[in-house]
Every structure is written in C-alpha cells, then in structure tokens.
Amino acid sequence: MNRRSALKIFGYLPFMASAIELFAQAGRRLPAHHTEDGFRNIDPNFEERSFTEMAPWVISHLTDLFSRAPKVDIPREYNDGSIYSLSKPYTVTWIGHSTVLIQMEGKNILTDPVWAENAGPLKFAGAKRVSEPGIELQKLPPIDIVLISHNHYDHLDQSSIEKLADRNPKTKFFVPLRVRDWFEDKGIRNVEEFDWWEGTTFLGLKIICTPAQHFSGRWVNDRNQTLWCSWTVLGKKKLFFAGDSGYGSHFKNIGNKFGPFDLALVPIGAYEPRKLMKPVHMNPADAVQANEDLEGKKMLSIHWGTFLMTDEPMDEPPKKLAEAVTQKNLSPENYWAFKLGEVREW
C-alpha cells in the first residue's frame, strides 16, 4: 500500500466510525420511557393533563408566586446536629419537603436537598417556603451521598447543592439521565448519572435508579428533556426514596424486584385539585397503597408542610394519612409523619 492510499483510508475513518454508530443506533430500540428528545411516563393508566386543563388553575395562582406566604405552624423538634456524632447505624431525619437525612451503615445520605426560601427560577418568585428547615445546612454531618430525583426547583436547588459541594468535595451526587449537565455547568464533577434500572455500588451500598411517574423542567422550553426517578439503596437494610411521583404500577414492579424495604420515603402532599394533580402527585391514600406495593416495613411521609404549591391546607396530609391507615386496618406505628427536625431509628 502506498502512502497516498494509506492517507485516504485514515481520512475515511471518522466517516466509517459515524456510519457504524448510525447502524448501531438504528438496530437499538430505545427504552419505552425514552422519546427522540426526552422522556415520558409509561404506565398504561397515566393520563397527562393538557395545557388547556391546567391553564385556568395556573393563572389563578400566579399572584402566589410573588406574594409573601404566611408561615405555617408545622410541629418541629429542636435539632442542633449533635445527635449525628452518635454511632447509630440507622437514623432518619425529616428536614422538610423531600429533604431527608439518612444514616445508613456508616454513610450519610441526603435526598433532594432544598434550603431555599423560594422554589422557582427567580429568588423573589416561586413556591414559597412556609416552614423553616428542620436543621440548618451547616449543622449537617459530612454528607457522603446525595440522591436527586429530578430537576424541579423544589427538589434541585442551586444554592443548597453548591454549599454541599463546597463543604465536602468528596460528596457524590447521584442523578437521573441528562441532569449531570446542570451540575457540570456549576463546576461540580463528582456526579454519577443513571437511567431507570441502572445503578452502581458506592461505599459498600448498591444505589439503583428506579422509575417514578412525574415530569421535569426548569423553564418553559425544557419540559421532559431530563429524566425523573426514584432511588433504591441496598445494604444490610433496604431503603427506598420515591422522589416525586403519582401512583402507578412502578411501585409494584420495584417492590417485586427489590422489596421488602425496611424504610420507604413516600410523598403525601401537593395533591389538590385532585383532577389536575393525580397523574404526578399522590394523596395520602395513594401513598399508603404505594408503600404496600413496595412492601415497606416503615414509611416516612415526605413532600408536605414546606412549600405553598397546591390547594390542600398545608397541615392536612398527615391527617389524611392517619385516616387512610385506619381505613386499611394498618398499624399507625409503621406510617410516620415527623415533626420538622425529628430523628428516629429505623
């Protein structure tokens, strides 16, 4: 082979590689929850609400985005962080909304960390915080693992994430598909990204990205371009974090695959008006059913009492939870609605 022929072959290599990749993509079927430019919910009973259905309710609440929310007297328990110096293998603390601190087999795990006063794209506008966090961020123990369920502002807060990354450069952030770019734009590189049913082993724990029924977006033009998820954490005990989700068959699928769970963190708030919220937010009765599907031994209620988002009274979800537990003749001791800052062993 002469030099000119060799140069031609090398010149064609990039195009050959591209062709091979195109053929590979053509023969590879995308998972059902993927679309050409984003993601979707796949439960056969899922019915997404149209813009026409949502618009009147959204417009009626526009003033809430800019008004000062009244503080709500959600019960709280004093927490100065000193308890975390104790060597207890399994504790759980409700900080507020979906932000929970879990101590599990010597690791400190934090879910959807949000200490912001407003959950929205502008500092002065968004869903208003009506109760203070159960513990100050700077009083947390060193965080090993942060689990992010999706990119909505009440679950992914830039200020809180940056403070956590600054406090401990070794903190590992686990996120669903296409959310890693958001972190890297902020200069945070210690991030692992997964699709549903994918995972890894980290610090002796198996961390698995599992399905949820919700949606994503941080602005008007990026709806569902990043994935939403729940998280399963497996060690000597089993932990489930539902993130934000409507009720669907995924809970039974996760329970069948990984259950029973020793502790399940399940949302019980942001459910009214029911017709509009049902596809993406569970009410307390749904949450109880989800926990049964998961085979959860203990359920901690999350996603309530913190941000002014929907129409039910802020302190109603725990009352409705108690009613749902009673109606099913379940043990109230296994269905927890914490005070802010409350810590229990699990």
Image (cartoon, rainbow, N blue to C red):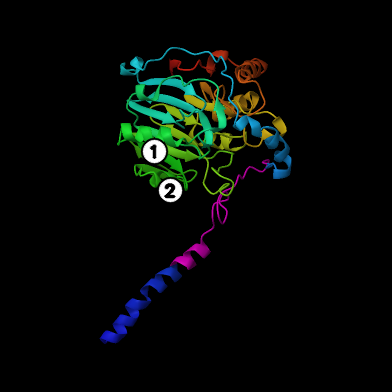
Q: Which residue is mark 1?
A: 173
Please tell me how crowded label 2 is: few (under 14), some (14-19), or many (20+) other residues with Cα within 10 Å: some
Which range is magenta?
Answer: 21-46
Q: 45 or 179: nearer the eye?
A: 179
- Write down the quadrant of residue 191 in the picture: top left
Q: Against 43, is 294 above or below? A: above
Q: What amino acid is labelled 2 in the image?
A: Asp
> What residue is shown with label 2?
181
In front here: 78 or 236? 78
Given residues 56 and 212, the one toward you in this image is 56
Disc 1 on helix, strand or loop? strand
Give the x, y percent position of residue 201. Answer: 36, 39
Q: Nearer the viewer, mark 2 or mark 1?
A: 2
Residue at 39% over, 21% down: 90
Q: Is residue 178 left or right of residue 3?
A: right
- Residue 7: give x, y in percent of width and height: 30, 81
Q: Main secondary structure of the magenta part?
A: loop
Instruction: Please tell me whether residue 144 is drawn above or below residue 320 in the rendered image.
Output: below
Residue 172 appears in the picture as rendered: yes
- The label shown at residue 201 is none
